Image (spheres, rainbow, N blue to C red):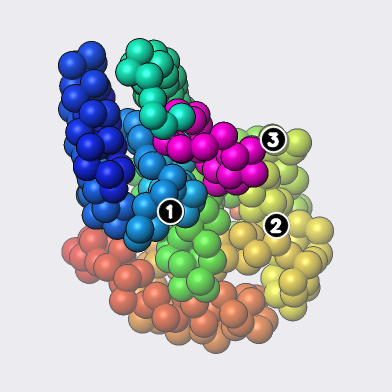
Amino acid sequence: MRICVIDDETVSLNVISAVLKRTVDHVVESFSSATQALERCREAPFDMILIDYQMPDINGVECVKKLRVMQGYQVVPIIMLTADEDRALRLEAIKAGATDFLNKPFDPEELRVRVKNLLALRQAQLALLDRAEYLDFEVQRATLQLRAREEELIWRLSRAIEMRDDATGEHISRVAISSKLIAQHMGLNEEFCRTIYLASPLHDAGKIAINDAILHKPGKLTKNERKIIQTHTQVGSDILAHGESDLIKMAHEIALSHHEKWDGSGYGNGLSGQDIPLSARIVAIADVFDALCSARSYKPAWQFEDAFDEILRQSGHHFDPTCVAAFESARDQISKVYAGNRQSNNAA
Ligand SMILES: [Fe+2]
Ligand SMILES: [Fe+2]
């Protein structure tokens, strides 16, 4: 424990320091100037302050006020030494934040006892602070663990769904990255960007209920088959409905609305414009772009540049123009995501 004693009277200062040094096994630093003491308090933390009321530079009450706003001194015990029993002065000192008083001339025994009690209080404060810091650390660790598990579960589930369409799972990871990049270039907050990154891989969760013969039909789909495929938005919505976390809530709106179009000609609920959830408007771009860049049984993969131009052309028709503008500004980063994809397409 470190104790700071401030008193302009040298005799009094020496007596207090001597009593404290003799009776308690702690570090005692003494100052005859409050200004100097405050400077020292700022650079080296003390566990207790004893301060005289009457001093030439700053009086005791003002000094207590200054200490209480200083970092680390909000609750440190402060004993004020006063030569009189003035009630108004004591009240003023308590209001400023003094913890206890000692009358001058003081009784060494009383000084010892008061200092001992307040140091015990200080030790309890430090133990509580330690405990609070420890609990805070534990809560942060548990939250991070929980988030990591949530992320892992989502990725594994998305992979399982995607395996039916694309055994490599690259479609969902590219859609997730592009969706996050679009969100970032729209200036959306970090939490939204993280959530869309994790929620977008579930956009086709409803495909789990679509018959293989239709899902993998090599030729053109009949009108009826197309209608069946289109039910995947509603099935996905049913799977993800009534979630409690922001992640599942967003995954739900994406699954239900990722085939809506800005001009109202899409499917799901036939929404248009800003009635379509923002997350779904973003994922719609990332999903279509990735489908264009990928080879299917009925079409070859488009060149990156051609697919990019197609998205820009669809601004205001299929897609939200604001999201398309963000997609365009993220071009360099998206291009890096598709660099590997382009090489394998060229080799094929
Ligand atoms: Fe879909
Ligand atoms: Fe998709």
**Secondary structure beneath disc 2?**
helix
- Whichever of labels 3 and 2 marks the residue nearer the N terminus, that label is 3
Amino acid at circle 2:
Ser
Q: Which residue is mark 3?
A: 244
Front residue of 90/311: it is 90
Tags 2 and 1 touching, CB below 8 Å:
no
Crowd around label 3: few <14 · some 14–19 · many ≥20 (10 Å): few
Name the quadrant of the C terminus: bottom left
Task: Give the Cα separation between the discs numbered 3 and 1.
Answer: 58 Å
Q: Which residue is mark 2?
A: 257
- Magenta stretch: includes residue 41: no
Front residue of 3/155: it is 3
Identify the disc placed on residue 59: 1
- The residues colored magenta run 77-102
Crowd around label 2: few <14 · some 14–19 · many ≥20 (10 Å): many
Judged by depth in the image, the label closer to the viewer, 3 or 1, is: 1
Taking 56 as reference, is 3 left or right?
A: left
Crowd around label 1: few <14 · some 14–19 · many ≥20 (10 Å): some
Amino acid at circle 1:
Asn
